[in-house]
Amino acid sequence: MLGGKIKTVCKEYGLYLAWIVSLLAVGGSLFFSEVMGYIPCKLCWFQRIFMYPLVILLGMACYKNDRSLISYILPLSILGGMISLYHYSEQKIPGLAKILPCTAGVPCNTDYINWLGFITIPLLALIAFTLISLILWVGRLQKDNIDS
C-alpha cells in the first residue's frame, strides 16, 4: 500500500522532488563554501561538477514536463553518488586516504563537519545523489509500467 503511494508520488511529482533535492544540495554546497568559508577539496569539486548541472537539467525537465531528460540525469547522479561514496569512505576509513592522497589544497579526508559522529559533507552529497537517483528511477519505472 505504502509502496504504491510512493510510486504514484514519484510518477506525478518525481521531477519536482528531485529538483528540490538538487537545489538544496547546491544551496548547502554554496553555504558551506561561501558563508562558512570551507574550502572544497578535490573530491568535493568533482561532486559539484556532477550536482550543479542537475539543477539546470531538472529545472528544464520540470518546466517542460519532459521525462526523457531522466536518461541524461541519472548517469550524472549515479556517478556523483559514487564519488561521494568514495569520499565518505576515505574520511571514515583512514587507510583509503593513503591510496589516492590529495596532493594539493585541502586534504580530502578532512571533516569540516561531523554531526552525530558520522554526518559529513560527502555523506550529505551521497544522500542527495541517492535520493535524486531513486526518485527518478522509481518514477521512470512507474511511467514505463503505465505506458505498456
Image (cartoon, rainbow, N blue to C red):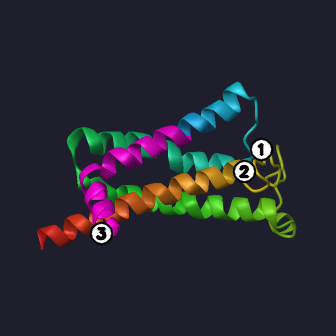
For the residues labelled 2 and 1, say whether their Cβ atoms are less than 8 Å apart.
yes
Circle 3 is placed at which residue position?
1
Can you tell which quarter of the image residue 144 is in? Answer: bottom left
Q: Is residue 18 magenta?
A: yes
Read off the magenta span: 1-25
Residue 84 horizontal side relative to residue 91, left or right? left
Q: Is residue 88 above or below residue 13?
A: below
SS at circle 3: loop
**Spot occupied by residue 114 in the image (x, y as percentages of width and height):** 78, 48
The residue at the point 59 percent across, 64 percent down is 82
Can you tell which quarter of the image residue 105 is in? Answer: top right
Circle 2 is placed at which residue position?
120
The residue at the point 53 percent across, 51 percent down is 50
Instruction: Tell me the mark number nearer the camera, choosing from 3 and 1.
Output: 3
Camera-side residue of 18 and 109: 18
SS at circle 2: loop
**Spot occupied by residue 93 in the image (x, y as percentages of width and height):** 82, 67
Q: Is residue 139 visible?
A: no
Q: Is residue 21 visible?
A: yes
Instruction: Tell me the mark number nearer the camera, choosing from 2 and 3.
Output: 3
Circle 1 is placed at which residue position?
113
Q: Is residue 115 magenta?
A: no
Answer with mark 2 or mark 1, whichever residue precedes in sequence.
1
